[in-house]
Image: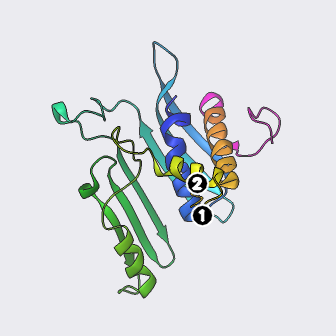
Amino acid sequence: GFGWGQLSHLLAFVFHVGGLCPTHAFAHTTLSERSGADLSVAAVITCSNGASIALSGSAAVPGNAHEAAGGQLGKYVSARFFGDEGMAVYEGYDQQPDSGRLQLSRRAGGLDPDDEAALASAASFAFENYDQAGTGPESLCSFVDACLGREHYVGAGAEVGLAVVRAIDAMYRSARSGRLEACAPGEGAGIVG
């Protein structure tokens, strides 16, 4: 379903960038009448540092993200981080780099040199690269580089991957039970930990 498919990518991004570790999830899903797979998910995830994540997504976007015909724009991704020092927003259509960018806003105003460097490196929106004429997503290229012993970027290592699996498992259990569920292995958990 949508949770294991597309939301896993967004959650990996949020956990990696935010340095977050999920502890509990409450969710609702809308299921396909034909297959029973989840088409839409809405969830609240709490984290070990007290942060909370409000998450929603849907596979019910019309059109085909691989064809521009009919006005299809691809998936729209929006990640907003709010914290003590300000906020960061990263959003846009995943196949249109000019549709978005990283935006930073500090409560104290102004930006420090690290902020300026981050903004310069994310001057356009790039989330998933699935251009069929390209070399594949950068995550796959990094995996190949790692296998070949080359320098590589680890965007979603084992700890982030485990956090994503635990969060999505808790989301699906919550959607079935109607209750808040723990994001850790235990009785009733669908994963091994």
- Disc 1 marks which amino acid? Glu
The residue where tag 1 is placed is: 151
Place of residue 95 in the rendered image (x, y in percent of width and height, measured from the top left): 30, 46
Q: How many marks?
A: 2
Residue 106 in view (yes/no): no
- Disc 2 marks which amino acid? Asp
Place of residue 122 in the rendered image (x, y in percent of width and height, measured from the top left): 36, 67
Q: Is residue 119 above or below residue 153?
A: below
Say which element carries label 1.
Answer: loop
**48 vs 138, nearest the viewer:** 138
Which residue is at a point 37% across and 81% down the rendered structure image?
116
**Disc nearer the start of the sequence (2/1):** 2
Q: Quadrant of the C terminus?
A: top right
Which picture quadrant has residue 51? bottom right
Say which element carries label 2.
Answer: helix
Which residue is at a point 61% across and 60% down the rendered structure image?
150
**25 vs 72, nearest the viewer:** 72
Mark 2 to mark 1 CA distance (whole Å):
7 Å
Q: Is residue 3 magenta?
A: no
Dominant SS of magenta comes to loop
Which residue is at a point 48% across and 47% down the rendered structure image?
55
The residue where tag 2 is placed is: 145
Which picture quadrant has residue 90? bottom left
Mark 2 and mark 1 residues within 8 Å of each other at the beta carbon:
yes
Q: Which residues are magenta?
A: 175-193
Residue 183 in view (yes/no): yes
Q: Is residue 185 magenta?
A: yes
